[in-house]
Amino acid sequence: MYPDHPTHRTPVPAAEVHRPVPLVPAPTTLPVNAPSAVPELATIVLPDGRTITGYTVASAQPAPVAAKPPASRAAVNIALGGVGFLAVSGGLLMLTSFIAALTAFIAQLVILAAVIFGGWIAVQVLGHRDRGAGTTVNIRKATFKRNRFHG
């Protein structure tokens, strides 16, 4: 953090010299896949008259597959039934979750309607009515003839 004082210098360690050690090569023994017998020579005559000669190579035969024992029909039916049950269970779980969510939504709508309608009723009942405001009409003499008003 602070610069060293010029009279107090840190001693420098002596340089270490590393000399590489040569590796001794290991004797190489490569696996030789020599054929057990020398393949025979084959000659092929092409349709245009050319002749090709070469060694025949036996193609590698795949290992015989062991025959699987046939599965029991009952075991197959049980397995398919289990898969079907798992599929239906997931669908039923989703259906019940949907019904529960729909029920909660409807309940919230009912509560909201009750709060709004209750507030409207409270304003109507407890609201301030000013009798001086508005127009007052006094009808002293009214005549109704044949369901018609004659003032």
Image (spheres, rainbow, N blue to C red):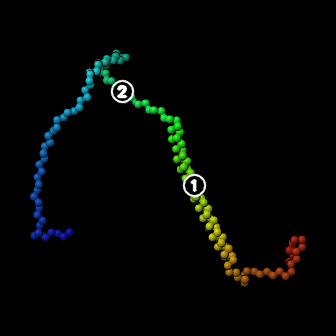
| Quadrant position of residue 25 | top left
| Quadrant position of residue 65 | top left
Residue 77 vs residue 4: left or right?
A: right
- Quadrant of the drawing holding the C terminus: bottom right
The amino acid on which the numbered mark 2 sits, given as a three-letter code, is: Gln
First along the sequence among labels 1 and 2: 2
Q: Is residue 51 above or below residue 61?
A: above
The amino acid on which the numbered mark 1 sits, given as a three-letter code, is: Thr
Residue furthest to the bottom in view is: 132
Question: Between marks 1 and 2, how big is the CA–CA gap?
Answer: 58 Å
**Could you say which is closer to the camera, residue 32 or residue 131?**
32
Q: Is residue 133 above or below residue 113?
A: below
Q: Which residue is mark 1?
A: 96
> x%, y% of residue 131?
72, 83
Q: Which residue is mark 2?
A: 61
Residue furthest to the right in view is: 145
Residue 118 vs residue 85: left or right?
A: right
> x%, y% of residue 12?
11, 61
Residue 104 vs residue 44: left or right?
A: right
